[in-house]
Image: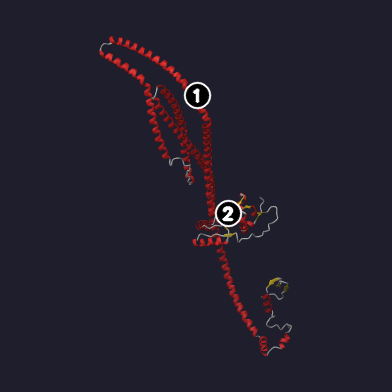
Amino acid sequence: MVDKEEVRLRRTIGLKKDEYFLDGKHITKTEVMNLLESAGFSRSNPYYVVQQGKIASLTLMKDSERLDLLKEIGGNKRKQIIQVVQYLDERLRELDEEKEELRKYQQLDKKRKSLEYTIYDKELQDARRKLEEVEEARTKVSEKSSERYNAVLDSHERLKELDKMSKDLTKELQGLNKDKEVLEIEQAEAIKKQTALELDVKDLEERMSGNMQAKDDAIKQLRMLQNEIQESTEELNRIKPLYDNQLKKEENITKGIMEREKQLSILYQKQGRATQFSSKAARDKWLQREIEDLEKVLYSNSSQCNWEMQLSGEALENWLVCVEVVVMSSGYGTLFLLPLFVSLQEATMREEQKLQEEIFGLNEELERLDSSIERRKAEIKELESSISKSRFNSQKTERDKLQDQRKSLWEKESKLSAEIDKLKSEVEKAEKSLDHATPGDVRRGLNSIRKICREYNIGGVFGPIIELLNCDEKFFTAVEVTAGNSLFHVVVETDEISTQIIRHLNSLKGGRVTFIPLNRVKAPHVTYPQSSDVIPLLKKLNFSSKFAPAFAQVSSFLSVNGHEF
């Protein structure tokens, strides 16, 4: 409704707009129509304006249409309009009431919102406080996590150092075991030599009973042999502390290895080269039995030699003691002792003179025999020198050379064994890492393929892609990222072989594997970008030429590496 007598109505028409303005205020088209109708310009009775074609429509109008037009002109529409206006007034009153209710509602809603705001603000403060507490706890946990992560890194570093130390100690232990074996062999040779020398002594003692000169020679030779035995014993005594020291060092190293094995949870098994005995207990038992036998023989020979050397002096001394006891027990005292002693002294002098003559004759005979022996010895030495020069020296030199060669081979064997153990350990670690990186079904499939080929004797299976290629270490990451699971595709010679293996795989439910038959694949033609900083990855891989179609078939390897190497 407009309370003015005059108003200004303006309509603005554009390409995308059609707007109405009442006294400069924007209104809708419906409000314009209502305003015109309230002013008497009704769309239902538009006869104040003769529209184009209206007269023609009136002349051509039907009777029923003319009747409706007369009723409309007569005021029937006005009554309807009045009813509508009354309804609108009643509706406006209701709207005023609703407006009042709305005002009250808005006041209450505003109060409600203020209360909700207060509650939400309080909850927000509580949430922020709790969030700060959680953030503080998270910071502490993050610090602890960082500390534990650093501790884990330190533990890994220490684990690597201990692993390296354990490998070094294992190598040293193997070297000590080889040295111990060498010492045991030398000890066995020394025992054999001592046994041979003692047997020679026994033979010489048997021949010594022939004559005194042979006895003296045997005694001299015995002394020489005893000196050699003493030297051998001293050599053994010199070797024994070193051997004991090596045993103690071995025990210390073994204890250290056991402690590190407990920390690392890895079991290292000692491996050594087999000796001439099946076990250490058998070797110790044999050595103890040989030592007891040799001690018995040595004690018996030494007792016999000492008895023969002391026999003459003991007989004379015992005889004099017996004489003195007989005289003193007869009761005559020195009355008979002096003549008896004088006669005994004269007899002794005569015996001494006789012995001197015999000794002089024996000395002449001894000199003659010595000269003969020296002459024979010279002849023997000449013969021995001529023989030894041609045989013994060459054999001894050859033996020493072979012993040195054997020691060097033992050392080389020890180094190679240690290197093999190290490589085996690295291979096991690499296989474990590969198993963790391989999908479970693919890993089971590869294991099943190996088992099927072994059981059914299937040939023409070359293995997965990853086992057929080799490249520089700096390309490992690029190959892993670009190829992905294609590295585990199995290359076979023909599609018949793959069909046969797949049939067995399905029957065993042994996993999933992708095959690349060489008789079916064809290398696609690829045009690489021509740029100085682009290198095709396929050209950086090393593999057999017969597998080239299989590698070319794997599209990942045809991708171009954009880094300059």
Please determine whether, in this image, residue 137 is positioned above or below residue 103: above
> Where the N terminus falls, by quadrant?
bottom right
Q: Which residue is mark 1?
A: 378
**Mark 1 or mark 2, whichever is nearer to me:** 1
* Left or right, residue 319 beside residue 91: left
In this orientation, does residue 211 appear? yes
On the picture, is 408 further left or further right than 549?
Answer: left
- N-term mark: 1 or 2: 1
Kind of residue at disc 1: Ala
Mark 2: which amino acid?
Answer: Ile
Q: How many marks?
A: 2
Q: Residue at x 36, y 21 (%)?
A: 311
Quadrant in the rendering for residue 131: bottom right
Q: Residue at x 32, y 12 (%)?
A: 344
Element at badge 1?
A: helix
The residue located at (57%, 64%) in the rendering is 110
Foreground residue among 116 and 140: 140
Residue of label 2: 466
Q: Position of residue 333 (x, y in %)?
A: 27, 11
Question: Could you say which quadrant of the image residue 341 lies in?
Answer: top left
Q: Residue furthest left?
A: 331
Q: Where's residue 225, x and y in %?
A: 44, 27
Work out whether residue 367 or residue 288 is closer to the camera in this orientation and state it: 367
